[in-house]
Amino acid sequence: MTTNLFSPIQIGTLELPHRIAMAPLTRSRAGQPGNIPQEMNVEYYRQRAGAALIITEATQISQQGQGYAWTPGIHSAEQIAGWRKVSEAVHDAGGRIFLQLWHVGRVSHQSLQENGALPVAPSAIAAPGKTFIVDADGKGAWADVPVPQELTINGIAAIVADYVQAARNAIAAGMDGVEIHAGNAYLIDSFINSNSNKRSDRYGGNVTNRARFLLEVVDAVTAAIGPERTGVRLTPMGRFMGMGDETPLETWGYIAHALNSRNLAYLHLVEPAIVGTVKDHTHDPMWDEVIRLMRKNYNGTLILAGGYDFETANKALAARRADIIAFGRPFISNPDLPERFRQNAPLTPADPATFFGGTAVGYTDYSVFDSKGGVVA
Ligand SMILES: Cc1cc2nc3c(=O)[nH]c(=O)nc-3n(C[C@H](O)[C@H](O)[C@H](O)COP(=O)(O)O)c2cc1C
């Protein structure tokens, strides 16, 4: 029988009833002060518990790892307690949930760092972009990112230890596992890509060296919580925030091969046509080639995300391009997305104006579908 979105699948020790996962989505609504998940966040995730797997919004592993205002962390006791309420609500509603672990690296600002320190990166090269901070009046504002400080070898080891502690904290918070965010120009991705990593030590230069930090994080986290509870997300050939690599097929092919031996719960890739949150409508045949190569080099469960709808997702599963499809924006505005797909019901479009920050509006007030009454609250 052809695999489709409703075929069950097992990842690690979890039985997923179907293959419609919720992609990680930053919503910038953590409780303040302290970046602590609050009641509104519990409700948001509870509403989406019908997903095969929820992957939470990116969650900073340390204060140093924060790059945007109002994003949640997993490094304080209060944050762990807040996330525990989220995981319990999702489990009570029959769902499964992994927490996405995040260190933004150079995509940060002194105002978000302890003692106003400079953000850290493999090399002292500024990202061509802005980040979102709180200004002197307590309002959100976009700010240029500064030239970061180059990490020392000890600094790198300290961050690996922060990933381990954060993974343990996620498990203490009742999560089924963690997803290591290694994409979108953040710290791990900026080590991988040759144009943001100009180091001459064992963390820079050839592909083996540029992938070393990723693999150290993966090995340390899997040793702490188990490979069956660990996933990795990559954005191969991503161009967000100035990412780029001189030898993409070699780099991403090597990484898929190296991760294959780690027995992870899954590998999660974003289609290269997606840049951050925006689709690039040009088409580079190498984007397909890199996904095919990674699929070939990685024998475990592969999740793909990026611009999918019901039809294209089913096609990708039937063609064995992926095993699971993660949906981002459709899950923002359709909390019952799997049920809508099942009933062939119309989808509610998402409103980008309420993606980041704000209240329950555009967050927990999207309706569910009822076959008799249409869309109901
Ligand atoms: C509002 C918003 C927030 C996002 N936050 C994250 C994030 O925290 N971590 C991450 O890996 N990707 C993040 N993404 C990317 C999505 O996970 C997904 O890859 C992207 O939206 C493409 O999928 P879609 O077309 O189904 O929305 C975000 C995207 C959007 C629209």
Image (spheres, grey):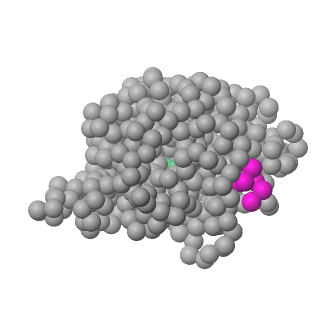
Q: Residue at x 53, y 39 (%)?
A: 265
- Position in image of residue 170 (x %, y %): 48, 29
- Position in image of residue 22 (x %, y %): 41, 50
Q: Which residue is drawn at 37% across and 60% down?
A: 330
Quarter of the image with the N terminus in it: bottom left
- Position in image of residue 3 (x %, y %): 43, 57
Q: Is residue 228 visible?
A: yes
Q: In which quarter of the view is residue 371 placed?
A: bottom left
Quarter of the image with the C terminus in it: bottom left
Q: Residue at x 60, y 30 (%)?
A: 222
Residues rendered magenta in the picture: 248-255
Front one among 371 and 69: 371
The question of residue 246 being in magenta is answered with no
Report the label total: 0
319 relative to 252, above or below? below
Q: Which residue is drawn at 74% across and 60% down?
A: 249
Q: Is 156 left or right of 3, judged from the image as shown?
A: right
Taking the view exactly as shown, the residue that stands out farthest to the front is 1
Front one among 132 and 253: 253
Q: Can residue 123 be seen in this view?
A: no
Q: Is 214 left or right of 300, judged from the image as shown?
A: right
Front one among 254 and 203: 254
Q: Is 18 left or right of 11, judged from the image as shown?
A: left
Taking the view exactly as shown, the residue that stands out farthest to the bottom is 282
Taking the view exactly as shown, the residue that stands out farthest to the right is 200
Chief secondary structure of the magenta portion = helix
- Position in image of residue 99 (x %, y %): 47, 38
